[in-house]
Image (cartoon, helix red, strand yellow):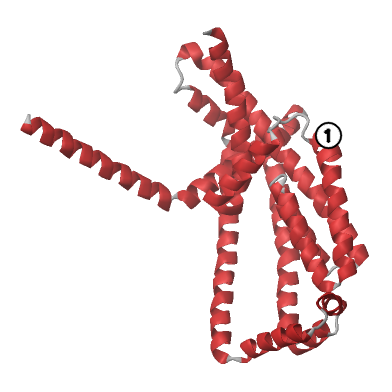
């Protein structure tokens, strides 16, 4: 009994250590796993376009090259558009900082806040304190380190985007082979059902990705037009922010609208109010007109599950995690409806 108890305890301890070791490896590889998942979902989203080109008599490899060249062109175009704007804005802030502070003290926003609070002295003192903080060399050194950290983060984001694009190309080229290989793990008696369910999952997820990108593009174009009309600061950058936010349904659109409205409010109260009213109207239009029409062929994900998936994915993997979490939820819904429910009904 002593030898057996020692053996059981020893094997159990080894099992716990092995589980902790595997968990640590998974934690270290979480970013890589997220890249792989995002690239797979992008490949699923581009596959319907490739299949459409194939049905028009085009070889698959030619269709993949055309679609991927289009995606690369959009990626390069976004970088070429956004990066110069960010650099220009930062340069203007550094060069004209004193004038910016003076203009802000004399702006309509400060006057509006003063009319509510009865005094703008505290606001002027806060602005002066911010100016003194920037005048301190030690703080400038800390700020420089923060800017370098942000720059490193941006560079890492570009590197991650490049990795995702390369993986997307490989997954898109070998998607059919991956499906066939995955079906080999299923017993022959259940293989046909597995193939049908997997085809429905990949097709639905692909349509979901395309639909969400279409909604985000509509939001970005309409935002660019409206923000340009009302004279919002850096409308191209704000429209790009609206595009990124709309990639995450419900939560992302609302978050982007709040951030853009606050930025417009800093320019002037009238601009901020106009932006807030516009996004309130647009979110109703998206929820009741655009989204049902564009997403009609994709799997329907309940609103509560969308919020839960977006929050959980964002907590685990940031913005990329939130983007991947919702298609995962859609896939789980298909598995439940096509596999689990029929088995329960047949029991």
In depth, the one of 73 and 268 nearer the eye is 268
From this view, report whether residue 200 is shown above or below residue 168: above
Q: Residue 114, position in %: x, y? A: 83, 79
Residue picked out by circle 1: 293
In depth, the one of 252 and 25 nearer the eye is 252
Direction front: furthest residue:
118
Q: Is 32 on the left-hand or right-hand side of 328?
A: left
Query: Badge 1, how many Cα within 10 Å: few under 14, some, many 20+?
Result: few
Q: Residue at x 72, y 45 (%)?
A: 250
Using the rendered view, name the quadrant where residue 344 is placed: top right
Instruction: State whether residue 182 appears in this view.
Output: yes
Q: Is 122 on the left-hand or right-hand side of 195?
A: right
Instruction: State whether residue 321 appears in this view.
Output: no
Q: Residue at x 58, y 86 (%)?
A: 140
Q: Residue 39, position in %: x, y? A: 58, 44
Task: Give the SS element for disc 1.
Answer: helix
Q: Residue at x 81, y 40 (%)?
A: 287
Q: Residue 249, position in %: x, y? A: 71, 44
């Amino acid at each position: 009994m002593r030898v057996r108890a020692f053996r059981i305890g020893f094997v159990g301890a080894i099992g716990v250590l092995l589980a902790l070791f595997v968990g640590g490896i998974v934690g270290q590889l979480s970013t890589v796993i997220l890249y792989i998942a995002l690239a797979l979902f992008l490949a699923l989203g581009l596959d319907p376009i490739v299949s459409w080109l194939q049905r028009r008599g085009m070889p698959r490899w030619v269709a993949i090259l055309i679609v991927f060249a289009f995606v690369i062109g959009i990626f390069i175009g976004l970088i070429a558009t956004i990066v110069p704007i960010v650099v220009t804005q930062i340069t203007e802030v550094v060069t004209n900082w004193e004038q910016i502070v003076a203009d802000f003290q004399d702006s309509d926003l400060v006057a509006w806040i003063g009319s509510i609070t009865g005094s703008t002295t505290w606001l002027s003192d806060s602005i002066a304190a911010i100016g003194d903080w920037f005048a301190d060399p030690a703080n400038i050194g800390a700020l420089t380190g923060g800017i370098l950290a942000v720059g490193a983060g941006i560079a890492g984001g570009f590197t991650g985007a490049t990795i995702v694009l390369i993986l997307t190309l490989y997954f898109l080229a070998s998607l059919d082979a991956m499906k066939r290989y995955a079906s080999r793990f299923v017993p022959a008696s259940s293989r046909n059902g597995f193939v049908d369910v997997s085809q429905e999952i990949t097709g639905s997820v692909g349509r979901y990705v395309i639909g969400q990108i279409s909604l985000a593009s509509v939001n970005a174009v309409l935002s660019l037009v409206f923000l340009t009309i009302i004279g919002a600061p850096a409308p191209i950058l704000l429209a790009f922010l609206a595009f990124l936010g709309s990639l995450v349904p419900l939560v992302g659109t609302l978050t982007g609208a709040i951030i853009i409205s606050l930025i417009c409010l800093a320019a002037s109260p009238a601009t901020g109010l106009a932006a807030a009213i516009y996004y309130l109207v647009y979110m109703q239009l998206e929820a009741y007109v655009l989204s049902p029409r564009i997403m009609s062929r994709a799997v329907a994900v309940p609103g509560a599950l969308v919020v839960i998936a977006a929050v959980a994915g964002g907590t685990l993997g940031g913005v990329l995690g939130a983007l991947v979490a919702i298609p995962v939820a859609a896939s789980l819904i298909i598995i439940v409806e096509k596999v689990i429910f029929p088995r329960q009904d047949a029991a």
